[in-house]
Image (spheres, grey):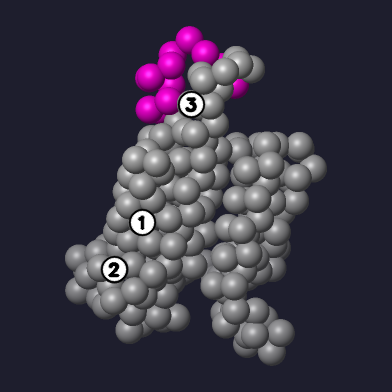
Amino acid sequence: MILFLLAVVAGYLLGALPFGYLVARAQGVDIFKVGSGNPGATNVKRVLGAKAGYTVYVLDALKGAVAAGWPLLYARLQHPAITTDDAGSNLGAIDGSLAAAVLGLVAAVLGHSFSCFTRFKGGKGVATASGGLLMLMPAPILIGAAVWFVICFTSRYVSLASILASITVPAAAWMLGLPLMLKIVATLLGVVVILRHHANIRRLIAGTEHRWERRPADQKDS
């Protein structure tokens, strides 16, 4: 129970770190007041350029990766010689660490979306969820990333790419026969990400959603 509590608290605090806000503020911009008003990597990239946007994406993904990864690392350090095929208490320890990793990731996504450091405002959780799920289920995440890139670069709708990737990842988790716990968390996180895109979905239906555009060479970061 202590491990679970630590995973939830650490995960939320990690997720709540407002990197999008901080990167923009370092350049004199309040990201909540420009563009879409979202502190995620997409809006930062749109307002401040590719360098700032990619920096925020990597930092946000790291939040999820650390939140999900440290309980797994802890279990490996505690039981370096065992595998998930072992029986008895050792298997219980690994199952417990996996549950803690899942809880940590869910808490990180909620922290990112409702950060206590920014009056419970936040992003949509795509980068944070993808970073954590990469630690837990790399194959579905790589499939989802492929879908994201194809949709984004053919339609130029980042939101549509994120929504379809959020459907693809849990679908791949179920089709690949991953442990039930991972199937459930992939599904739940996919639902959370899609719900956080409700405004984008309305704009996509209305045909008013912003497309991703390449910035002219003279406007790119130096």
Q: Which three-letter amino acid code belongs to the residue tagged 3? A: Ala
In the rendered structure, the answer to whether residue 70 lies left or right of residue 153 reads left
- Which image quadrant is residue 143 in? top right
Compare residues 176 and 87 and report the one nearer the observer.
Answer: 87
Return the x and y of residue 199 as percentages of the image width and height.
Answer: 57, 82
Residue 47 covered by magenta stretch? no
Compare residues 89 and 101 and report the one nearer the observer.
Answer: 89
**Above or below, comparing residue 183 to residue 156 in the picture:** above
Tell me the residue that label 1 is attached to: 12
Q: Which three-letter amino acid code belongs to the residue tagged 1? A: Tyr
What separation in Å lies between label 3 and label 2 (alpha carbons)? 32 Å
Residue 81 covered by magenta stretch? yes
Return the x and y of residue 145 as percentages of the image width and height.
Answer: 62, 49
Considering the numbered disc 2 on the image, is that residue within a helix, a strand or a loop? helix
In the rendered structure, the answer to whether residue 35 lies left or right of residue 157 reads left
Q: Are marks 1 and 2 in contact (CB under 8 Å)?
A: yes
